[in-house]
Image (cartoon, grey):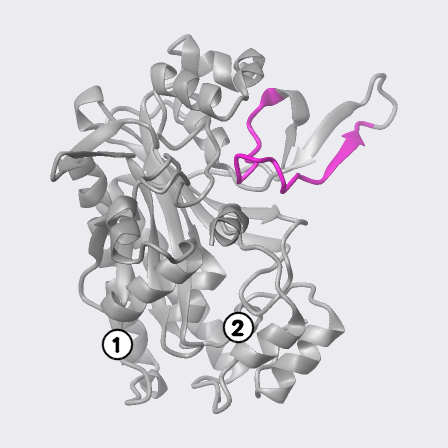
Amino acid sequence: MSGSKQADLAGPGISTYEAVDHGLPTDYSSLLSPKETQRAIMMAKQYIEEGLCRELNLFRVECPMILTKDSGMNDYLDRDGSRTPVDFPAGLGISPRLEVQVVQAATKWKRWALKQFGCDVGEGLYTDMRAIRKDYFLDHDHSSYVDQWDWEKVVTPDQRNLEYLKEVVKRIWKVIKGCDTLLRKEFPALNTDKYPPIPDELKFVHAEEILAMYLDLPRKQRETALVKEFSAVFIVGIGAVLKDGYPHEMRAADYDDWITPTVTNDGEQFYGLNGDILVWNPVTQRRHELSSMGLRVTKETLVKQLEISQQTHFLQMPYHKMIMNDQIPLSIGGGIGQSRLYGYLLRKAALGECSVGVWPEELHKVCEQHNIHLLR
């Protein structure tokens, strides 16, 4: 069992197309045509962006597609560095050429951008982020092309607590629920007895509590069991080592704060000011991650987490020096997968019904056998 838990710590993992075939629904039919789907996506995108701005006091900014390698601002996604960015030399005619990387997420850039755009306490920004993640297994739920709302907001020291995190999460879910209501009104075909409406509220559960509920299960199976029971959850505290000696999942050490003590439960200390929104997808009968977010590291927790991850050399990078020198503000932020969320709201069986990507022909064939047609 320990081997299963170890293998389940980093990222979405690797599967087979035989397993994908086995897991796809056998009675699927899209509720909307491809044209209706695109119209619904346009409506949902506008509603969600306006809702996030309203609920979190955000404004839209432009987002980089590439960053310099030595800035330290790119997102390495997992602590073990197993998913590396696309990099290349840029700048014809200059010597040396710039060493740049395609963003995997704008996670760290956004915190610096709060300063660049002069955001005050309680004010924040969001981006219509596009990224490339070349090290994903390409299936019905993962693509090398990523579309995401990345958002970040300035906070005060006394807002760095679990209660504030939960309040922000509730506001985001309010926007998602409102979007579901709008889409069901404008596209009546979504009102079907086959799939229930999304829940009104999220269930908040700490990773330690989930471990206690499903002690012998690896992380993904714990999450699946949880969302089957509660439909929509926010898992708190992802990154710190749990009672079984493993973190719930590996998380990068230089943005979310997963080491700060928060609450005690029966004398046991819980850690972490971050978490994920996960839902039960009634179409695929699988767990579905929609968003990851958290209060960001202070200079003290940055050092602690880099020591745990054995990455203290990161402290020499410009981004990390800005945190250590108090040159960028304290913040909270996260990412919301756009096509992931569209698929959930529109009751789709595959990410590629909402997003144009590149998938192997084997996956196209598997999906078509289940009446799932990926966009090309």
Say whether residue 257 is magenta: no
Question: Which stretch appears magenta?
Answer: 71-91
Badge 1, how many Cα within 10 Å: few under 14, some, many 20+? some
Mark 2 sits on what residue?
350
Q: Position of residue 357 (x, y in %)?
A: 65, 63
The residue nearer to you, when weighing 356 against 79, is 79
Q: Is residue 45 visible?
A: no
Query: Hey, which residue is sitting farthest top in the picture?
Result: 325
Q: Which residue is located at x 29 percent, y 78 percent?
A: 184
Mark 1 sits on what residue?
197
Tell me the element at label 1: loop
* Amino acid of disc 2: Ala
Left or right, 328 with respect to 132, comes to left
Image position of 372 with respect to 137: above or below? below
Task: Please tell me the numbered disc located at residue 165.
Answer: none
- Distance, label 2 to label 1, CA atoms, is 19 Å
